[in-house]
Amino acid sequence: MSTIKLKGSSSGEAAVTVAAAAGTPTFTLPTTVGSANQLLKNSGTAGTLQYSSLVEDSSGRVGMGTASPNKPLHIYTGSSDAEIRLQTNSGTEQNAYITARNSGGALDVYSVNSAINFHPDNTKRLEVLANGNVEVTDGDLVIGTSGHGIDFSATGGPDYGSGTSEKLTDYEEGTWSPDFYYHSSVANVSGQYTKIGRMVYAYFAGTIYSSQSDHQRINNLPFTTVNLSGGVGGVARGYQNFDIQNGPIYYIEGNSTRVYFYKDNGNNMSAADCNGLDFRGMVVYTAA
């Protein structure tokens, strides 16, 4: 019957000895004591083990390259990139890589000759194809919130180089309250807007009742106009059942939130001229 016993020496060497009739093979541990919780591996030399780069702490966390793992699997490579490789068959190109770059801190995901799919709830939601196309396979593509949007670049990176003309950013939409300023009463007032970058598309509608002679205007555009004196946009009129000669021709004032009403001959359109009439249109202008 074979027996197993442990022995040590003054040099710190430890060994496992298996006693057998045919001899006594000895498996020797390294003479240098490893760090706490360091695991052993086959050294490549028959009968000799050595400490590996793996550590398993008392909580079951495994560290590779670090003696103090703080995650279930903690890989530390110092000044080198850290890479995880997944391979389905030996000798084939069915490989995938996840690389944390030491320079710049980028995280790269590679899939050789294949797509990368994302399954957040066991259903494929997003697919990056091998040709570079991105497809949303189930659901809507929602990009950002107020103050965020899409950037287009001719250079293929975040440094646009040729200026803001290559950017589509800051998409926003909502409602606003057109203020038909000189009135005794109003009805059916509504307003919606869309803002893309600095371009604003503000729809308005309302019926005005007034006997005042003051120059009529709309106040309270959703964004202040750019500070230009020669006009900052225009208004596309919606349906109206009165003669354009009597107005309105619209003028959007710079550095303000006001749109003035004029007649076809260039004279002011008074609030009394608007009495009982329905107004609707789309104000298109550049925001400050």
Image: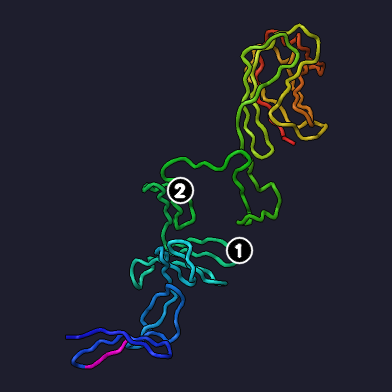
Amino acid type for the residue under numbered disc 1:
Gly
The outermost residue toward the top is 211
Q: Which residues are magenta?
A: 23-27
Which x, y percent locates residue 267? 82, 16
| For residue 71, above or below residue 164 | below
| For residue 195, above or below residue 156 | above
Which x, y percent locates residue 96? 42, 64
The residue pinned by badge 2 equals 135
Q: Which sits in the foreground, 120 or 23?
A: 23
Callout in the foreground (1, 2): 1
The outermost residue toward the front is 10
Left or right, 96 with respect to 101, comes to: left
Q: Is residue 21 magenta?
A: no
The outermost residue toward the left is 1
The quarter holding residue 193 reads top right
Indicate the quadrant containing the N terminus: top left, top right, bottom left or bottom right: bottom left
Q: Which secondary structure dominates the residues rendered in magenta?
A: loop
| For residue 239, above or below residue 95 | above
Classify mark 2: helix, strand or loop: strand
The residue that appears at 57% across and 42% down in the rendered structure is: 144
The residue that appears at 58% across and 62% down in the rendered structure is: 105
The residue pinned by badge 1 equals 104
> Residue 54 has which mark?
none
Q: Are marks 1 and 2 in contact (CB under 8 Å)?
A: no
